[in-house]
Amino acid sequence: MAPSSTITPQTLSAADAATYIGMSQSYLAASRRTGVIAGRTPAPKFIRIGRTIRYRKTELDVWLNNHQDLEFTGQS
């Protein structure tokens, strides 16, 4: 019997990516369609393979790090 190994995926589906970053699938879908809009948080980078959308976990981590909590913004 061969030893079992765990494969860690490098990419996530849109549903898994949304869960991972704490946003909705509709946010990710809308941001893929609209691109960068002034005054709105840009979406993480994604990969299109045919009709399939995938998100690299490393890119999601970069996106999360770029949107860290602010100590005080002066707004509520």
Image: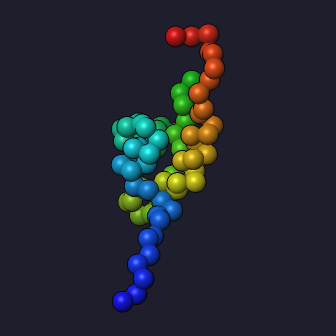
Q: Out of 10 and 25, give the one closest to the viewer.
A: 10
Q: Out of 50 and 17, give the one closest to the viewer.
A: 17
Residue located at (47% from left, 41% from top): 21
**Residue 71 located left or right of residue 60:** right
Q: Residue furthest bottom?
A: 1
- What is the x, y in percent for residue 22? 43, 38
Residue located at (42% from left, 37% from top): 23
The tally of labels here is: 0
Residue located at (52% from left, 54% from top): 57
Q: How is the image coloured?
A: rainbow
Residue located at (58% from left, 42% from top): 63
- What is the x, y in percent for residue 65? 61, 40
- What is the x, y in percent for residue 41? 54, 31
- What is the x, y in percent for residue 66? 63, 37
Note whether 20 is above or below 71 in the view shown: below
The quarter of the rendered structure image containing the N terminus is bottom left
The answer to whether one can see residue 39 in this image is yes
Would you identify the image quadrant in which residue 27 lies?
top left
**Residue 63 located left or right of residue 25:** right
Q: Out of 3 and 24, give the one closest to the viewer.
A: 3
The answer to whether one can see residue 37 in this image is no
Note whether 42 is above or below 19 in the view shown: above
Would you identify the image quadrant in which residue 50 lies?
bottom left
